[in-house]
Amino acid sequence: MAQLSIHSPIGDLTISEENDKLVSLDWGWSPFQKKTPLLMEAKKLLDYYFDGDNPKFDLPLNPQGTPYQKKVWQEISIIPYGKFLTYSNISEKIDSHPRSIDMACGKNPLPILIPCHRVIGKKEQLTGFSAVGGIETKKFLLQLEVPNVYFNIFN
């Protein structure tokens, strides 16, 4: 598995590639670095993203998860930059329950690339984020995309 680590405003991130597809984006720095064309493209797009641009993350992904989780992640993947949906919105789209959407978001192995931070609670509440920094990281990512929106934080 090839990995490339980058510095970002939300901490060090490590992108992992397997069989020419991205499989994870994790917080932290990997001692095993390998620059592949795909990892370098992902780094470039993430750098653009953190600079406040709206890059098209059109990268080959292969997140590992259950068929249900993959269905949720596919729905999340189509939320446009600067927009957000609630867990209820997504549960209605796939005929599920908001709590199970939340759980699938928490298992997302490719945060930012599969933008689970764009899924929020009712009344624009930020109810959780499984990444390092939790809700504050989610708030940072949303405000990077939509600078003038206020989000309620619910713990």
Image (cartoon, helix red, strand yellow):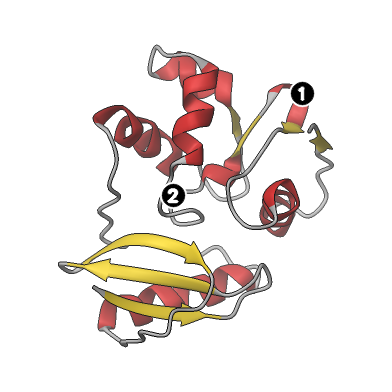
The amino acid at mark 1 is Lys
Asked whether residue 58 is in view, the answer is no
Residue at point 36% right, 86% down?
A: 33
- For marks 2 and 1, the one nearer the N-term is 2
Query: Residue placed farthest to the front in the image?
Result: 31
Residue at point 36% right, 82% down?
A: 40
Q: CA distance from mark 2 to mark 1?
A: 23 Å
Regarding mark 2 in the picture, which secondary structure is present there? loop
Regarding mark 1 in the picture, which secondary structure is present there? helix
Say which quadrant the N terminus sits in.
bottom left
Residue at point 34% right, 69% down?
A: 16
The amino acid at mark 2 is Ile
The correct choice, above or below, for 47 with respect to 64 in the image is below
Report the residue marked by disc 1. Answer: 123
Residue at point 43% right, 45% down?
A: 108
On the image, the x and y values in percent for residue 88 come to 57, 18
Report the residue marked by disc 2. Answer: 114
On the image, the x and y values in percent for residue 135 come to 72, 46
- Residue 123, image quadrant: top right
Q: Dot 2: few (<14), some (14–19), or many (≥20) neighbours within 10 Å? A: many
